Image (tube, helix red, strand yellow):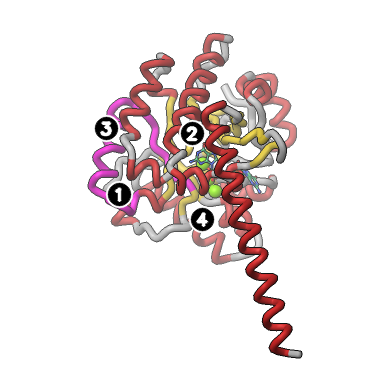
């Protein structure tokens, strides 16, 4: 009867909670080890100029090569890394690996291309991120002009005086500052212009819905107009179709990133987008001229 059933449901719920908790503990133990042993790999996704087809920057996206669970995406472990304080060490690995890779592309004779890393708001607010960036640029001897950070809108809104100062210092060194997933937070125009920001990346959800929702289309239009009036560069993330690309181009969006151009791939594969030949191949699918 009802009472018994309720109890069973609760017991089941409790069991699930415990399973979930123990899964978390195991994953945390594994993550500690992964950070100390370097069980990670970076994939790279290009951002492309809509007019010339040139790669402007490549974003480094971390994956965990888990010994039992296989390749895990960041959504499975970044939060855990943030909550456990492992994020600083993980980010140092990401930055060092990305910078070494950018340096190595250059040494292989590729044209200079910027590498972008995602910075966690936890990390940005609580640790000396600027010192960590200086250290990695010093150690790898990468030109700061080839380094970019992506921070979310939420990170700007906490502790804004500190954020403004640190971002200003990074900008002065020649580092590019991008705001990731823009439109999902609550920044207003008047708020945004106070920050030394180079680029806004329009969140994927607006791009996903822009062809079928006039509201989303209007938001995209407004973000592009606003960013232009503030002299910011605009990147649309999550572009999957030629229709989206065409609409974005019409609106004056500068760059796109998404599966239409490439999924995140390994360093060797992404480098194929740096040459004219491969841009021409890409051209056949996207209609973006190869440029020059
Ligand atoms: P993000 O920085 O906004 O990165 C974009 C995410 O969207 C990536 O997922 C990418 O694979 C995916 N994506 C790109 N183009 C498309 C598309 O056309 N369609 C669809 N459906 N998806 C697309 P990923 O690699 O799973 O990364 C998820 C998030 O994890 C990132 O979002 C970023 O916030 C975070 N992340 C990744 N690497 C790092 C890192 O090294 N440090 C920190 N703190 N966070 C990271
Ligand atoms: Mg990003
Ligand atoms: Mg993003
Ligand atoms: Mg996103």
Category of crowding for the residue at label 2, using alpha-carbon neighbours closer than 10 angstroms: few (below 14), some (14–19), many (at least 20):
many
Secondary structure of the residue carrying numbered label 1: loop
Q: Which is nearer the eye, 117 or 256?
A: 117
Give how far across and how far down residue 214 sits, in percent.
Answer: 58, 65
The part of the chain drawn in magenta is 156-180
As displayed, is residue 15 above or below residue 231? Answer: below
**In front: mark 1 or mark 2?**
2
Q: CA–CA distance between discs 1 and 2? A: 31 Å
Circle 1/circle 4 CB separation < 8 Å: no
Predominant SS of the magenta segment: helix
Residue 193's disc number: 1
Secondary structure of the residue carrying numbered label 3: helix
Secondary structure of the residue carrying numbered label 4: helix
Which mark sits nearer the N-terminus, 3 or 1?
3
Q: Which is nearer the eye, 218 or 155?
A: 155
Q: Is mark 2 within 8 Å of ligand 1?
A: yes
Asked if residue 166 lies left or right of residue 210, the reply is: left
Q: Quadrant of residue 38?
A: top right
- The residue under label 3 is 169
Which mark sits nearer the N-terminus, 1 or 2?
2
Give how far across and how far down residue 285 sits, in percent.
Answer: 73, 36
Q: Quadrant of residue 223?
A: bottom left
Q: CA–CA distance between discs 3 and 1? A: 16 Å
Residue drawn at x 63%, y 57% is 20
């Amino acid at each position: 009867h009802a009472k018994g059933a309720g109890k069973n449901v609760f017991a089941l719920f409790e069991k699930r909670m415990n399973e979930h908790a123990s899964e978390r503990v195991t994953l945390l133990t594994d993550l500690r080890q992964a950070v100390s042993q370097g069980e990670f790999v970076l994939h790279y996704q290009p951002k492309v100029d809509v007019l010339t087809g040139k790669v402007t920057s490549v974003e480094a996206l971390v994956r965990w090569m888990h010994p039992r669970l296989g390749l895990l995406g960041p959504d499975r472990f970044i939060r855990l890394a943030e909550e456990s304080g492992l994020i600083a060490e993980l980010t140092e690995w990401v930055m060092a690996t990305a910078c070494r890779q950018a340096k190595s592309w250059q040494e292989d004779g590729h044209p200079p291309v910027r590498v972008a890393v995602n910075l966690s708001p936890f990390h940005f607010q609580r640790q000396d991120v600027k010192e960590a960036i200086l250290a990695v640029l010093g150690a790898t001897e990468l030109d700061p002009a080839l380094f970019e950070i992506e921070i979310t809108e939420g990170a700007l809104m906490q502790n804004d005086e500190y954020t403004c100062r640190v971002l200003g210092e990074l900008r002065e060194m020649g580092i590019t500052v991008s705001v990731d997933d823009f439109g999902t937070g609550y920044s207003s125009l008047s708020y945004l212009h106070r920050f030394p920001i180079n680029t806004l990346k329009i969140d994927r959800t607006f791009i996903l819905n822009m062809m079928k929702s006039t509201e989303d289309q209007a938001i995209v239009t407004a973000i592009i107009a606003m960013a232009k009036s503030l002299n910011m560069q605009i990147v649309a993330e999550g572009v999957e179709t030629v229709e989206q690309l065409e609409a974005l181009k019409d609106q004056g969006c500068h760059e796109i990133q998404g599966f239409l151009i490439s999924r995140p791939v390994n360093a060797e594969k992404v480098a194929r987008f740096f040459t004219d030949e491969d841009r021409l191949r890409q051209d056949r699918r996207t209609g973006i001229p190869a440029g020059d």
